[in-house]
Image (cartoon, rainbow, N blue to C red):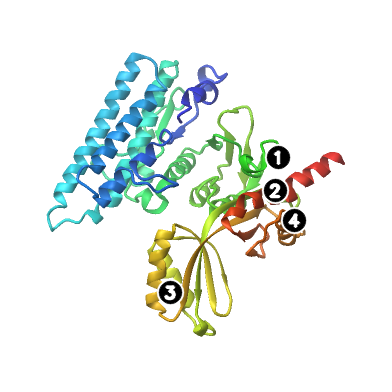
Amino acid sequence: MSRVRELRDTLFIGNREGAALYGRVFVVSAFGGITNLLLEHKKSGESGVYGRFANADNDHGWLEALDAVSQAMVQAHHDVLDHPADLSQADAFVRDRVDGARNCLIDLGRLCSYGHFRLSDHMLAMREMLSGLGEAHSAFVTTLLLQRSGVNARFVDLSGWRDERDHSLESRLKQGLSDVDLTCEMPIVTGYAQCVEGLMAEFDRGYSEVTFSNLAALTGAQEAIIHKEFHLSSADPNLVGQDAVRKLGHTNYDVADQLSNMGMEAIHPKAAKVLRQAAVPLRVTNAFEPEDPGTLIDDKPADEPAVEIVTGLDIIALEVFEQDMVGVKGYDASVLDTLTRHNVRIVSKATNANTITHYVDSSLKVMRRVEKDINKIYPSAKVSARPLAMAAVIGRDLHGLSTLTRGLQAIAAAGYSALGATQGPRNVDVQFVLERECLKPAIAALHEEFITAPAAKLKAA
C-alpha cells in the first residue's frame, strides 16, 4: 500500500475508462509498518502501542508509541497525496482517530485502576481497535487519491469506529455495502472488520483475508484476487536467483495449506474454505504486473507429478524424552495441552518409543515457559528446546518422484546434512530438518534438484 500511487496507474485505473473502472471491490491493508507500530513488530516482536500499554513499562511509553504511529501515518499519506485539500483531510482524519484512541486508552487505564475491572478482560477489544486504525487510514487515503484522479471511489469503513451497535461479520459487511452501486462506484474497504465474532481472536493479523474472502462470497464475485508485491513463485528469488524461480501459474488449495503451515501464506486456510464453499476462484497476482494472470488456486489435481515450490522457516524442536513413556498413554496429550495454552503453533512432529518431538514456530522465550510447565507435569522427563530450521518441498502430487531420497542427496551434495526428514502418505510435501545456518543453501540445493535442473532438461529436449 505504500506504493499506492503506482497501483493507481496500473491496478486501480490502468487502461480502464468509464464503466470498465467499476464492478470491483478493493480490500486494503495498512501502509507498510503501521500495524507493527500499533501492535508489535511481526518479526522482531518489538512492542508497539498495544504491547507497551499491556505491559505498562511506564506511564508514558504507550503514549510515545501512539505519537510515533501518528507521525508515521502522516508521513505515509504525505508520500502519497500531493493536493493541499487532500492532505488537509488526511491530516484531520489521523488526528481524529489517534486522539480518539488515546482518550479511549486513558479512560480504560483509569477504569482498570479500580479493583472491580481487569485490563485483561479488555485487551482483545483494545487490540482490535488499534489494528483497525491502520486499515481505516490506508483506505481513506486511497479513496482521496482515486477521487482526485477522477475515479468515483468510496471509503467503506468496517472498523466499527464510534459505532455502538453489535454486528456479526456478515451484517457488518452487508451494512458497509448496503447502498454502494458497484456499477458506478469503486468501494475501498478496510481489511479489518469489527464484529461480535472478534476476527483477531482466531486470525490475529490475518483478518484482512477473512474480510476479503467473506466479501467475495457475499457479493458472488466472479473471481477473488490477492494482489501481492511479487508472484507466487517456486522459491524466494533472493535465495535461488531471480532467473531461477518459476511462477506457479496454477496450483490447488492443498498446496496453499502446506504453504500456510510453513509460514508462507498465500491465503489463510479458513479464508480459502469460504471461497471454496462459495465456488469463487482465487487468483494470486503481482500487483505491479496487472497484465500477468498470476497463479490460479482451485481444487483441481495436477496433470502430472511435480514439485511446485521449495520454502522453509526457522523452527524450534521441543523434545520430551521419558524412559517410562513406552506403552503409557497420555504423554502426547499433556504436551499438546501445554503448547495450546502458550499459543504455540506446531509445524510438524515426530515420535518414537520414548521421545516426542514437536517442531514449532515460536520464540525461545516462550519455549522456556513451555519447558517449565512440562517439567512440572513430568518431573523425571528430560525436556529441551533447540533452535533449528525446516525446509519443505511441496507439490500437488509428488508420487513417483523419490522426493525424500533425492532431497537428502541434494542436501548432502551441497555439503550439508539433514537432522531429520518426514514424508506423509498423501505425497504433497516432504520436510527436512536442518541446522539454522543450513536452511538457505539447502533451499537453493533443493530448488536446483527439483525445479531448475528438470526445467533445463525439458528445455534442452
Q: In this view, does 181 lie above or below 274?
A: above
Categorize mark 1 by other alpha carbons within 10 Å: few (<14), some (14-19), many (20+). Answer: some
Check disc 1 and report the residue beneath it: 244
Q: What residue type is labelled 4?
A: Ala
Residue 196, position as x, y percentages in the image: 31, 49
First of labels 2, 4 by sequence position: 4
Check disc 3 and report the residue beneath it: 334
Q: Is residue 186 above or below residue 225?
A: above
Q: Are marks 2 and 1 in contact (CB under 8 Å)?
A: yes
Q: Are marks 2 and 4 in contact (CB under 8 Å)?
A: no
Q: Do the residues labelled 3 and 4 touch (CB within 8 Å)?
A: no
Q: What residue type is labelled 1?
A: Ala
Any mark on residue 413, and which? 4
Any mark on residue 447, and which? 2
Q: Which secondary structure, mark 2?
A: helix
| Residue displayed at 29% across by 27% down | 93
Q: Is residue 21 left or right of residue 237?
A: left
Q: Are marks 1 and 4 in contact (CB under 8 Å)?
A: no
Q: What residue type is labelled 2?
A: His
**Residue closest to the eye, 130 or 376:** 376
| Residue displayed at 63% across by 59% down | 431
Categorize mark 2 by other alpha carbons within 10 Å: few (<14), some (14-19), many (20+). Answer: many
